[in-house]
Amino acid sequence: MSEMNFKTIAELFKNSVDRFGNKEVYSYKSDKNWVTITFLEAWNYVKNISNGFYALGFKAGTHVGIIADNSVWWALFDYSTIFSRGVLATIYPTLTPKQIKWISMHAEARYLVCGTKKLAEKVLAIIDHLNNVDYVIMLDNSEIEHEKFITLDFLLQKGKEFEKANPHVFEEEANKIKSSDVATLIYTSGTTGEPKGVMLTHENICSNVISSVQVLELSEDDRFLSFLPLSHSFERTAGHFLPTSQGSKIFYAENLLKVADNIKEVKPTLMVSVPRLYEKIYGKILNKISADSFIKQKIFWWAVNVGKKCIRKEGAGKKIGPILSIQRKNANKLVYSKIKEQVGGQLRYFVSGGAPLPKEIGEFFNAIGVTILEGYGLTETSPVISVNRLNRNKVGTVGPAIPGVQVDIAHDGEIIIQGPNIMKGYYKEEAATAELFDREGWFHTGDIGEIDEDGYIRITDRKRNIIVTAGGKNVAPAPMENILVASKWIEQAVILGDKQKYISALIVPAFSTLEEWAKNQGIKWNSTKELIKLPAVKKIYDQVVLESMDGFAQFEKVRKYILLPEEFSIEKGELTPSLKIKRNVVMKDYENVINELYGVK
């Protein structure tokens, strides 16, 4: 079997095991040391887990829910469920017991895979209501006093016993897998309403992996650092199936707080991330530079401007002249190389997805030699629709469509697509599925955008987010929000104004930057609530908002804003697990504040 000759995820994994054998595939931190697992060792674990499933009465088509943080065991249970002809339903570990209960019941999960004792407490709170669940498997081997809970070690032991008595069942079952079979249920994070279970088939995911490999230069020498949730389709395809198919090595970050440290240890060559990571790194860099001497600041911004000239020429398909090339080399020695070390020093490129990347931040990183290829996709499209190319990276776009995917723009500006990566449908939601397709079979993404003369896609906003002012003007909030969060002073922003006379904004300050500034000014405060009400602080944000709105039409500009005392968070339900802001939740949580902005009593 050649490296790209796979029609199911089981074939993808077996192919890589046959090709790479004793090569290391996974690495994770244990007692301060990185522990590695080879392809063959991973294969044996997958076989053992699958046989353990069979020993417990697992049947083809069984649904398995997984509630765990990223780990090698998450990956192994994914493949084990697939080889057992089961369907893995992903459940974010950040969800509440009530949300876990809803998904477990909706997905009809017979088995739950639970990461830690702490997560087991959430499951225990609802277990008596989960009549469909037969077993809960504890990945950390915590012994929970409940008849449905079993440990990983117990499952592995059962697998060994089953294989001795039934040596051929594993391969016989794996050989029955068809490309049209549903491989996974990925529940959308639900920015509005209840989440929907997206049914992705083996063909959906495999076509997406094969097409992505054709445009992204991957090899068995690449090292990935995995930290986005594997429950999300972006990390699942781009940071799990994709690298495994090419023999690349995957390191699992210890946790989100340790990502910066892990980057320096692992020295990844490739990483996939949502824009929040780049926004935070960008803010830290600007903070540090603003504290440097005048000369250092001058050199830094000269280097950035040189880089911007270069990437704009490259994006337009033009050659960089000899003078600019020399300037770029000097800028690399003086500035770029030092920043590159902060991301491990060996990074070839980042891939950004999951939400729009502010153009200013994309330009900044690409200018300093930290390449970010912005792409675009949806859970419903497995997920990749398009991605920029290394040889032609147009910052501000999400690149051209990947091979096999057709993209067009509907009469109302909505992006529509056709391709083998489009989901089978929403689980138990035939009517909701049908709504997404038109008579010609085009899938409607819900995003508004345009396609340039080179086939590169530019997204302007979500269709449902478009604001219509009281004056009948259409306003896309995303471009304004992206400009605002590009400021070192702003962490998060939500643009408002639907059916109102003017546009306003809820702004969450970048408190690390603001508090450091306040300390240097000798300002004292007792709480963030007190800090954001100070006249000196208002003066800063008045200026930031004014400058950020430069270039927007008069009816688009933010006329009023309110600073909020704390960040939007997953815990409060204001962010999805992939860190997108749930506008409807934020608007409900801050209804009184919004009424104040518009003078409503």
Image (tube, grey):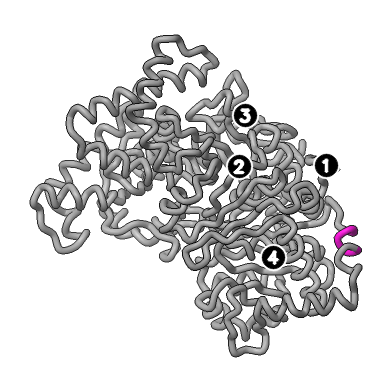
Q: Amino acid at mark 4?
A: Phe
Q: Label 2, secondary structure: give it.
A: loop
Position of 150 with respect to 475 (left or right) is right
Query: In the depicted view, which residue is nearer to us: 447 or 242?
Result: 242
- Tell me if residue 425 is in the magenta stretch: no
Residues at circles 2 and 1 in contact by the CB criterion of under 8 Å: no
Position of 335 with respect to 241 (left or right) is left
Other-residue count near label 1 (Cα within 10 Å), few / some / many at <14 / 14–19 / ≥20: few
Other-residue count near label 4 (Cα within 10 Å), few / some / many at <14 / 14–19 / ≥20: many
Q: Is residue 470 above or below residue 366?
A: below
- Tell me how far mark 3 sits from mark 1, CA to CA: 24 Å
Quadrant containing the C terminus is bottom left
Mark 1 or mark 4: name the one nearer the start of the chain: 1
The rendered magenta stretch, by its main secondary structure, is classed as: helix
Which numbered tag is attached to residue 222?
A: 2
Q: Residue at x 65, y 58 (%)?
A: 186
Which residues fall within the magenta stretch?
A: 172-176
Quadrant containing the N terminus is top right
Position of 301 with respect to 2 (left or right) is left
Query: In the depicted view, which residue is nearer to us: 3 or 425?
Result: 3
Q: Amino acid at mark 2?
A: Asp
- Residue bearing mark 3: 400
Mark 2 or mark 3: name the one nearer the start of the chain: 2
Q: Nearer the viewer, mark 4 or mark 3?
A: 4
**Occupied quadrant, residue 184:** bottom right
- Residue bearing mark 4: 77
Mark 2 or mark 1: name the one nearer the start of the chain: 1
- Tell me how far mark 4 sits from mark 2, CA to CA: 23 Å
Q: Is residue 101 above or below residue 364?
A: below
